[in-house]
Amino acid sequence: MFIGHYALGLGAKRLAPAVSLGALFLACQWADLLWPTLVMAGLESFTIRPGITAVTPLDFEYYPWSHSLLALAVWGAVLALIYRAVSGSSVRAAFVLGALVVSHWVLDLIVHRPDLPLAPATRLRLGLGLWNSLPATLAVEFGLYAAGVWLYLRATVARDRIGSLGFWALATFLALVEAANVLGPPPPGIGAVTASAQAMWLLVAWGYWVDRHRSIRCRLPGA
């Protein structure tokens, strides 16, 4: 799951229009932004096993601090409290950010093999295995993505060329990365995977940049 997470970040702009797209991206992908750092620190681990699923060759052996349901619930609460304290945002905005953090586990549950932990100390692993079907994975991810882009465009309007061209460049880039991840060859090594995962911080910055050049089209009561 890649652009499916970003789809929820884009769509959440409708619920929390005052929150920057960069912050929404940070929340929806917090698990994957944290994960490579923990791998590099030796706290989590994975291996590359081509053919383990039809979509990804990554075997997520141990990642309870970044991807367990309990950990993400805690991370989501912390992010929501920090954001509200720093920005003075509404309770709705803080709740949306916290929910986006937890949504990462829910979406991963749909696509992963049974490798997602409920909590760091438990052995039970869950996953519905959509990654075993490439066509189904592409249909679900790009379907979610189309809906997310549509909702974001319903919630905002471009103020200038950066707001328009910059957004469509971002949207196209995300789709191309998804296609490359799914249809490309296995990564050459663990270092290449962690480096590319760390590069996702640039997408957070891109989201902040684009969103500054767009105006809120509508605001829900209490948002």
Image (cartoon, rainbow, N blue to C red):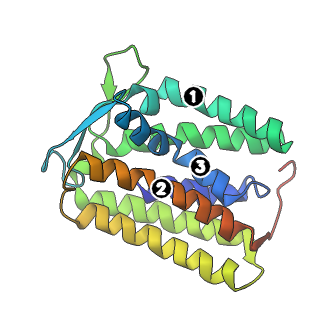
Neighbour class for label 1 at 10 Å: few (<14), some, many (≥20)? some
Residue at 47% x, 56% y is 200
Residue at 66% x, 29% y is 77
In the rendered image, the vertical position of residue 24 relative to residue 208, given as above or below: above
Residue 216 location (% of width, % of height): 80, 67
In the rendered image, the vertical position of residue 19 relative to residue 39, given as above or below: below
Neighbour class for label 3 at 10 Å: few (<14), some, many (≥20)? many
Which residue has dot 3 on it?
26
Which structural element holds mark 2?
Answer: loop
Residue 89: in sight, yes or no?
Answer: no
Taking depth in this image into account, of 29 and 43 the one nearest to the observer is 43
Neighbour class for label 2 at 10 Å: few (<14), some, many (≥20)? some
Which residue has dot 1 on it?
73
Amino acid residing under circle 3: Leu
In the rendered image, the vertical position of residue 144 relative to residue 172, given as above or below: above
Residue 185: in sight, yes or no?
Answer: yes
Residue 3 location (% of width, % of height): 45, 59
Residue contact between numbered discs 1 and 2, judged by CB atoms under 8 Å = no
In the rendered image, the vertical position of residue 170 relative to residue 113, given as above or below: below
Instruction: Give me the C-alpha separation between circle 3 and circle 2.
Output: 9 Å
Residue at 31% x, 16% y is 123
Q: Give whichever of discs 1 and 3 has the lower sequence position.
A: 3
Which structural element holds mark 3?
Answer: helix
* Residue 200 badge: 2
Instruction: Give me the C-alpha separation between circle 1 and circle 3.
Output: 15 Å
* Residue 213 relative to residue 45: left or right: right
Residue contact between numbered discs 1 and 3, judged by CB atoms under 8 Å = no
Which structural element holds mark 1?
Answer: helix
Q: Give whichever of discs 1 and 2 has the lower sequence position.
A: 1
* Residue 199 relative to residue 183: left or right: right
Q: Give whichever of discs 3 and 2 has the lower sequence position.
A: 3
Residue 2 location (% of width, % of height): 41, 55
